[in-house]
Amino acid sequence: MMHGASVISLVIVILAAFLTPILLHRLKMNFMPVVVAEIIVGLIIGKSGFDLVSQDTWLETLSMLGFIFLMFLSGLEIDFSAFAGDKKKEKLPSGKDAPNTFMVSSIIFAGIFVLSLLLSYLFVLVGLIDNAFLMTLIISTISLGVVVPTLKDAQIMKTNIGQIILLVAVIADLVTMVLLAVFASIYGNGDSNTWLLLILFGAGVVFFFIGKVFKHRSFIETMSKGTIQLDMRAIFTLIMVLVAISETIGAENILGAFLAGVLVSLLSPNKEMVHKLDSFGYGFLIPIFFVMVGVDLDIWALFEDPNILLLIPFLLIALLISKIIPILYLKRWYDMKTTLASGFLLTSTLSLVIAAATVGERMEIITSEVSGALILVAVITSIVTPIFFKKLFPKHKNVHKKMKVAFIGANQLSLPVTRELNPDLYETTIFHTQQDKIDKQIAESLFEIKEINDFRVETLKEQHAFDVDLIVVATGDEERNAEISLFAKEEQVNRIIASVASPEWGAKLKENDIDVFSTLLSTKTMLRALIEAPGVMKILTNQETMLYQINFNNAKYDQILLRNFPFTGDVIFVRIFRGKDSIVPHGDTDLKLGDRLIVTGSREYVNELKQELELRS
């Protein structure tokens, strides 16, 4: 009988998780995060509603695994390249220079944390809560799971204000998770064994270096395909080992899972791997966890205690105050609407509040009623604050910016290409040394060349040669080309093309995601194409039917099927490159952010399509 009840409850929860996003879509409730809807559905089928689900080992185990995997993905979401600060100066619509994102984000979070600490002691003085440390973590936390999709939807993820909001949330995620582990270590068994956390972080460092060593080994890539999927096995092993170490030293298992996610993020996984992890987590385990959060939450019990009824509105007010006041620091660069909208979005809390409430309840520091109130407030903020953000934030204007391209070295190969690039799409600058300038008279009449004393990286940096979107390095000296290209990579230039002929330099640059070309290789490839496929060469060289690449960056058309694509005109989709995959497009092929689209058609229409699809959020 118990076995039957177990299976029935599991089926009900899985059905609820499956039907929730479908209902959201049908009811056009796009403003609500799916995870919040899953909690609400859990309320309906759980203790607060029809009480259709009974707790058992199956659900408890799967729910715990979902919680662990959620913390892993929270760590994986952290993009550490944001901590590098701004490499390029950006002008704001107000005319002011954009602030340094890392510095501003750190100041804002410091304000949030200090204010959260003061508000927590106020809660203790009033008698609404007993532990100021736990309440500080709850008030100061921010939900990356709400912030990231909202920024993407508003198409401001890559803007200065979007990066500041994102980085504040990232810092909050990191700090509150580490402090939650310290909290669990101090208050868990009454023994202060915080120093044991060093064992966990030491193990993390060891695993990181092991990952660095094996990441680029050819046999790893070979064994990560088909039925072996070695990369996925390695990640799940890492999660379980770090979770086991966490529990062994007396810390919470979620810290080990979070650390595993951080380590994988630091190792820069490819998009395909991240997609597989997201699919598994958000497609199976995590929905079960969120539905079970709602199932276990007894809303009616909250109304029996007057203190709980006071705690809910006061906590909502505290969350708003702790975010709105520090975010006013942005008024130095942004208008009031933008600033307030950012504050509202940062008020959203979810995963870490649930984590903190779960930990606090398990250690009997807070009651199940208080835990329920904290989760309810987190759900309310996740629904309400993104709506306020969308209402307040100024509409993002879809203005296409020209791609800045720098050519390092003027020669018979690079100079003609600058004339061929569409001036409506590309802004080109040629850097060349004065003494080596070829045919100076002709060059000055046809090309604008920026003269420099030498090709040293210091000289090029002084001339802002690396403040571009794409750099082509063709100085005539392949060793110098390689040096400049690797430095450009450190300067975070989006794309780099270098002229090298030797296989050794070519292999090294390709390892760093730098594209290479050489006159010999180009000549051989063209001659072979003329012999084997003359028709293809006509397409490549004909101005009206040549092939073009469009980088798909506009989130507005993400996941749209080609048959439903709203643009019609003289263009054909020839091929779609997605990560390492090459896809032959059909009507049922969906476009995804990051795709590289190879198209052919009239130049005028292709330029129009390029402006629309390459628009970055």
Image: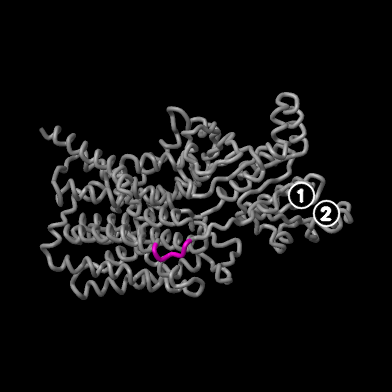
Residue 266 percent across, percent down from the top left: 48, 50
Query: Is 5 left or right of 478, judged from the image as shown?
Result: left
600 shown above or below 484: above
Residue at the spot of label 2: 446
At x 56%, y 50%, the residue is 612
Going from N to C along the chain, the mark reached first, 2 or 1, is 1
- The colouring scheme, among rainbow, by chain, secondary structure or one colour, is one colour
Residue at the spot of label 1: 419
Query: Is 266 left or right of 291, judged from the image as shown?
Result: right
At x 51%, y 39%, the residue is 214
Residue 38 percent across, percent down from the top left: 27, 48
Q: Which residues are magenta?
A: 391-395
Residue 486 percent across, percent down from the top left: 66, 50
Q: Are marks 2 and 1 in contact (CB under 8 Å)?
A: yes
What kind of element bears circle 2?
Answer: helix
- The N terminus appears in which quarter of the rendering? top left
